[in-house]
Amino acid sequence: MSRHGEPAPPVRIVHLGLGAFHRSHQAWFTARAHDASEWGIASFTGRRPDAALALAPQDGLFTLVERSAEGDSFEVVGSIAEAVDGADTARLEELLAAPATAVVTLTVTEKVYDDGSPDAPLGRLVRGLAARRAAGGGPIAVVSCDNLADNRTAARGAVVRIAEDLDAESDEGGLAGWVRENVSFVGTSVDRITPRTTPEDVAEVAERCGYRDASPVVAEPFASWILSGDFPAGRPAWQDAGAQFVADLEPFENRKLWLLNGAHTMLAYSGRLRDHETVADALEDPVCRRAVAEFWDEAARHLTQPGLDVPAYRAALLERFANPRIAHYLAQIAQDGSLKLRLRCVPVLQAERAAGRSGLGAARMIAAWIDWVSEAEQISDPLVGAIQEALGRSGRERTEALIRLVDADLAADAAVVDLIHGLVGFARL
């Protein structure tokens, strides 16, 4: 694949975290804007250069395979003007210093916000912002595109904290103050299931499209992007592709975190315990499906803001989850459970308890996680050491210790511990 001599769009967006989701989401939305020819993206990888090595020889072009139950459609996405190894900090700083660069988008994991090291993605971003300040590049927007609740607050806090650390090491100082005055942090809720590309997908693109794409992306037909915040230097017309701009993002974040991500977590643990491999497989199991429905009923009681249309959203999720041609693997979703439960489950359980109800549906999700970590051969979680220590205990004491890793307040509530402990093993019944 190549542009055959046609120029790439000029770089006005810098992205950190070049991966499949970025390409199926932010790059796709940008390509569908009516002013796409004015908004090229320079996409930088994280800790590994692989994605840049695959895309750079293709001039940043890639094929989006939109996969539905009815079949596949194919679209060449051309919004990535540069695919760059994240280790190339000189190019990152050069682009961030350029006045034409108006937006920085991020697809990073929750763990990145706590990593203040200079070589981490946010450390690289802050050094780039320092270069922008030195060059007089003007205001810029930083747009977080991850599953973290209130992600713009997390991004702002992490960036300012790193800037303050750099100020402390510098005789000049003032970077943190410049960031506060010149960097707008935009919060978003993002949604598009994007499974890993397989060799079979690469072969299908070659056969169906008649060209070789070393790095196509597969995604479901559904795509959602809800944003809240200011763009002081402008932005693409993302609304052309269906993006929504709202004043209050939190209700939309909660709808997605609790209904979509929460259901994924419930299916991941209960489904794996019942020997299912994918979301679609688990959804066909009455035990797993009932657990999701009961949790959704609880969450829906706390999603009452106008415009959320929870019944329609639930119906759409069931259709999306059941797509037999999107292999969304439960083992991948099951990773980092201690962090995910805090966002996807705990708020619903707390809200239900505060309203005088048991929170049985939400409690069942934590019980499924406890069962899964008790049986998993390998646990991928930032608290793996503490989880293994807790697993060395027995009975109710083990349950309480594991709940404490998710939320200390829940672990201090004897009634909640009793409820969850009584649910342990439900998925095996």
Image (cartoon, grey):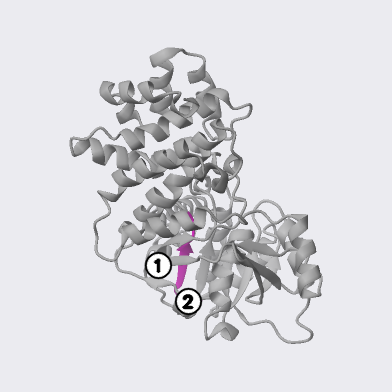
The mark that comes first in sequence, 2 or 1, is: 1
- Could you tell me residue 11's position as x and y percent? 61, 77
**Can residue 18 be seen by looking at this rendering?**
no
Quadrant in the rendering for residue 229: bottom left
**Segment colored magenta:** 137-146
Mark 2 to mark 1 CA distance (whole Å): 10 Å
Residue 238 circle label: 2
How many numbered markers are drawn?
A: 2
| Residue type at numbered disc 1 | Leu
Q: Position of residue 393 (x, y in %)?
A: 47, 13
Q: Which residue is mark 1?
A: 227
Evaluate whether residue 410 shows in this view.
yes
Look at the numbered disc 1 and give the secondary structure of its residue.
strand
Mark 1 Cα-neighbour bin, 10 Å: few <14, some 14–19, many ≥20: many
- Amino acid type at image mark 2: Trp
Labelled pair 2, 1 in contact (Cβ < 8 Å): yes
- Quadrant the N terminus occupies: bottom right
Measured along the vertical axis of the image, is residue 187 above or below residue 154?
below
